[in-house]
């Protein structure tokens, strides 16, 4: 059983995670994670491993399972998010394991750091977001840099995992430099250390100043998008309801329609795109305006008019 224990506090573990640990004969994990579940493992065989010994943990779990033990291999957060699920499956496949080979594997999900840290600062993930690890121990830096640049340009809210360690100090500065190519210096940033644990610390700052904050391996850095704001100690990324609805009255704005996006959705954009071309605006200018590939606009305009758009047009421009 690959058990995600969430941020570490027992009240934030799922019922299944607690039950899996209770059922297990053997508990395996990184020493810090073992400490987080110390109250649940009394009387069990406990195998503690150090940092960087992920493959050793997986091999140990397989050997114990082959010996007939029920094993709980614990990860903080979610075992499938930068956790032990991936390396464990790699070890299993290399050993010739299949689902019907006699060893059953269960993934027990838990709240990842992105969920826990977001909950501590407000609602920063209400719109599209992604997670990127700055650890270049296993991933080449150019790959990480390309992902950072693409996410920044695409206006994702971004959670940076493993942002800085004792030996990896420059990566967070490089990430900041890449983001500043696309984001305003005053873009809100929240830095959460040890969410829901005894030494929890939360700092609100900006993209321009974030590298001056205390950031380490137990920190998660949440970088807002172009709409994210901080108010009364809450970091919020609007979903876009204010564009469509009068939030005080609950009704749609003039020209909008409940259940359909008329101005900003795909069909409305296609209609506006065709009108812009008809007005003589070049595709190159439209590509710059929308920050989309020129080839995408060409291919889009070459497609037949969607039936749904034709129906909208027949409704009188709705």
Image: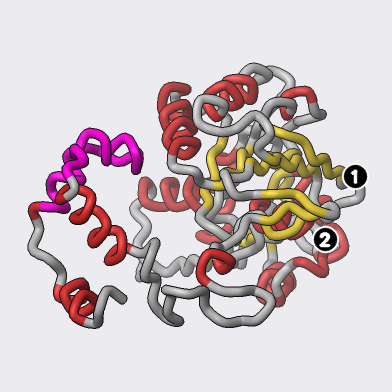
User: Would residue 294 be counted in the magenta stretch?
Assistant: yes
Camera-nearest residue between 117 and 228: 228
Q: In the current view of this chain or complex, which residue is farthest to the right?
A: 198
Residue 139 pos. (x, y %)? 46, 29
Label 2 CA crowd tier, 10 Å (few <14, some 14–19, many 20+)? some
Residue 137: percent from left, percent from top = 54, 26
Side of 304 where 90 appears, left or right: right
Q: Residue at x 53, y 51 (%)?
A: 129
Instruction: Tell me the magenta residue range.
Output: 280-301
Q: Classify mark 1: residues with Cα within 10 Å, few (<14), some (14-19) or many (20+).
A: few
**Residue under numbered circle 1:** 199
Estimate the x, y position of residue 238 in percent, counting from the top left: 61, 59
Q: Is there any visible trace of residue 43 in the rendered image?
A: no
What is the distance, in whole Å, between disc 2 and disc 1 at their CAs?
A: 12 Å
Mark number for residue 9?
A: 2
The quadrant in which the C terminus is found is bottom left
Up the image or down, 83 lies above or below 17; here it is above
Tell which of 36 and 284 is nearer to you.
284
Q: Residue furthest front?
A: 279
Q: Is residue 74 above or below residue 25?
A: above
> Colour scheme of this structure image?
secondary structure
- What's the residue at 85%, 58% (across, down)? 38
Q: Secondary structure at mark 2?
A: loop
Examine the structure image and report whether residue 147 is included in the region drawn in magenta.
no
Q: Quadrant of the N terminus?
A: bottom right
Q: Residue at x 75, y 40 (%)?
A: 191
């Amino acid at each position: 059983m690959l058990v995600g224990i969430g941020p570490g506090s027992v009240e934030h573990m799922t019922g299944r995670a607690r039950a899996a640990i209770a059922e297990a004969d053997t508990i395996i994990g990184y020493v810090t994670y073992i400490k987080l579940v110390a109250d649940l493992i009394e009387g069990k065989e406990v195998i503690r491993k150090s940092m960087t010994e992920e493959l050793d943990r997986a091999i140990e779990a397989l050997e114990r399972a082959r010996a007939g033990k029920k094993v709980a291999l614990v990860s903080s957060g979610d075992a499938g998010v930068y956790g032990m699920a991936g390396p464990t499956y790699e070890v299993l496949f290399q050993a010739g394991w299949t689902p019907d080979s006699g060893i059953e594997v269960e993934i027990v999900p838990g709240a990842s750091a992105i969920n826990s840290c977001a909950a501590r600062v407000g609602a920063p993930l209400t719109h599209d977001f992604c997670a990127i690890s700055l650890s270049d121990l296993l991933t080449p830096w150019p790959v990480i840099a390309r992902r950072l640049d693409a996410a920044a340009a695409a206006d994702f809210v971004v959670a940076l995992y493993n942002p800085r360690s004792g030996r990896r100090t420059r990566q967070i500065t490089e990430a900041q430099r890449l983001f500043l190519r696309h984001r305003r210096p005053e873009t809100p940033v929240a830095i959460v250390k040890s969410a829901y644990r005894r030494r929890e610390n939360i700092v609100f700052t900006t993209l321009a100043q974030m590298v001056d904050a205390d950031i380490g391996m137990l920190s998660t850095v949440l970088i807002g998008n172009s709409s994210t704001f901080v108010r009364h100690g809450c970091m919020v990324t609007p979903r876009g309801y204010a564009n469509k609805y009068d939030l005080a009255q609950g009704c749609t704005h003039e020209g909008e329609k409940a259940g359909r996006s008329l101005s900003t959705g795909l069909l409305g954009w296609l209609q506006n795109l065709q009108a812009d071309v008809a007005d003589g605006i070049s595709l190159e200018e439209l590509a710059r305006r929308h920050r989309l590939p020129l080839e995408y606009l060409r291919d889009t305009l070459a497609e037949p008019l969607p039936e749904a758009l034709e129906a909208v047009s027949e409704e009188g421009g709705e």
